[in-house]
């Protein structure tokens, strides 16, 4: 510590041990003397005695999230292919953004589509993938724009669909919806959306590594999502070589 910090700021004269702390200070000088005496009685370094037996381990479960699983040599995409996909996707996003601006400036907008409630995960899964009492809905631009008109609805639906990929695997219909949503997701990525996209890439890489037979369309879809997450959305630690 610099000696300048040790220099006295106030001149308080000689301090003797006859200060009666049971009585209030009679002057400012008397008060400062009491402060000095009390400070002299304090240890320079204080160490807390902690009983390690009373310390509890955190109850919150932790999960180590690894990167993508390396693709088998026969299924790994080339760098040229990846660069081509990124370029095509970038052009698509620009085109969709242009259409969205034109739609906002158009007075005769299409009527809003009836959509499930934001919190209704099952309703959204049935809406996108179909069920016994719900027909399959394809991700048309009108539907995607209608979804985007609702704040954070794109992010929430993307999360629902990625959870479906993690639990049920990637289907053609799931792929259509995820690709459509990626074309309108806002940049820069919200932290939750970024986490969601990383889950998507990891899920695709695990499924790709476990393929028992090569299905070109299925492999291309998995490679595409890993590529876009890693190289377009800049999660480069997940990228295929």
Image: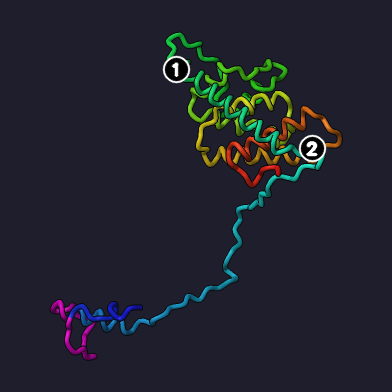
Magenta stretch contains residue 15? yes
- Name the side, left or right, on which 64 lies relative to 22: right
Q: Is residue 17 above or below residue 223?
A: below
Circle 1 sits in a helix, a strand or a loop, which is it?
A: helix
In the rendered structure, which disc, 1 or 2, sits on the residue that comes first in sequence?
2
- The outermost residue toward the front is 80
Residue that extends furthest to the left in the rendered view of this protein:
27
Q: Looking at this view, name the residue that lies furthest to the right.
A: 213
- Which picture quadrant has residue 225? top right
Q: Is residue 235 left or right of residue 17?
A: right
Between 121 and 136, the one nearer to me in the picture: 136
Dot 1 alpha-carbon crowd within 10 angstroms: few under 14, some 14 to 19, many 20 or more: few
Which region shows up in magenta? 11-29
Q: Position of residue 114 (x, y in %)?
A: 55, 16
Q: Residue at x 65, y 40 (%)?
A: 199
**How many neighbours does mark 2 have within 10 angstroms: few (below 14), some (14-19), or many (20 or more)?**
some
Q: Nearer the viewer, residue 148 or 55?
A: 148
Q: Residue at x 17, y 87 (%)?
A: 13
Which quarter shows the N terminus? bottom left
Instruction: Please give the name of the residue rendered at 69% of the width and 22% of the height, measured from the top-left corner.
Output: 129
What residue does disc 2 label? 75
Real-space Cα separation, disc 1 to disc 2, in angstroms: 42 Å
Q: Residue at the location (38% across, 82% down)?
A: 43
Task: Report the side of 99 relative to 44 (left or right).
Answer: right
Residue under label 1: 104
Give the percent coordinates (x, y) of residue 69.
Answer: 74, 45
User: Is residue 177 magenta-colored?
Assistant: no
Closer mark to the observer between disc 1 and disc 2: 2
């Amino acid at each position: 510590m610099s000696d300048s910090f040790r220099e006295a700021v106030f001149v308080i004269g000689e301090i003797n041990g006859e200060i009666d702390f049971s009585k209030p200070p009679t002057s400012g000088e008397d008060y400062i003397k009491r402060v000095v005496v009390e400070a002299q009685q304090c240890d320079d370094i204080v160490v807390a005695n902690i009983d390690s037996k009373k310390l509890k381990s955190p109850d919150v479960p932790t999960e180590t999230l690894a990167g993508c699983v390396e693709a088998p040599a026969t299924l790994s995409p080339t760098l040229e292919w990846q660069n081509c996909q990124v370029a095509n996707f970038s052009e698509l996003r620009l085109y969709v953004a242009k259409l969205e601006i034109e739609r906002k400036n158009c007075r005769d907008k299409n009527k809003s589509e009836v959509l499930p409630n934001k919190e209704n995960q099952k309703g959204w899964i049935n809406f996108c993938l179909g069920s016994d009492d719900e027909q399959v809905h394809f991700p048309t631009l009108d539907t995607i724009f209608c979804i985007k008109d609702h704040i954070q609805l794109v992010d929430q639906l993307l999360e629902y669909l990625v959870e479906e990929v993690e639990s049920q695997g990637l289907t053609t219909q799931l792929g259509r919806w995820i690709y459509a949503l990626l074309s309108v997701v806002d940049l820069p990525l919200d932290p939750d959306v970024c986490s969601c996209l990383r889950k998507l890439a990891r899920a695709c890489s695990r499924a790709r590594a476990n393929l028992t037979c090569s299905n070109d369309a299925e492999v291309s879809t998995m490679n595409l999502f890993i590529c876009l997450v890693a190289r377009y959305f800049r999660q480069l630690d997940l990228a295929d070589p």
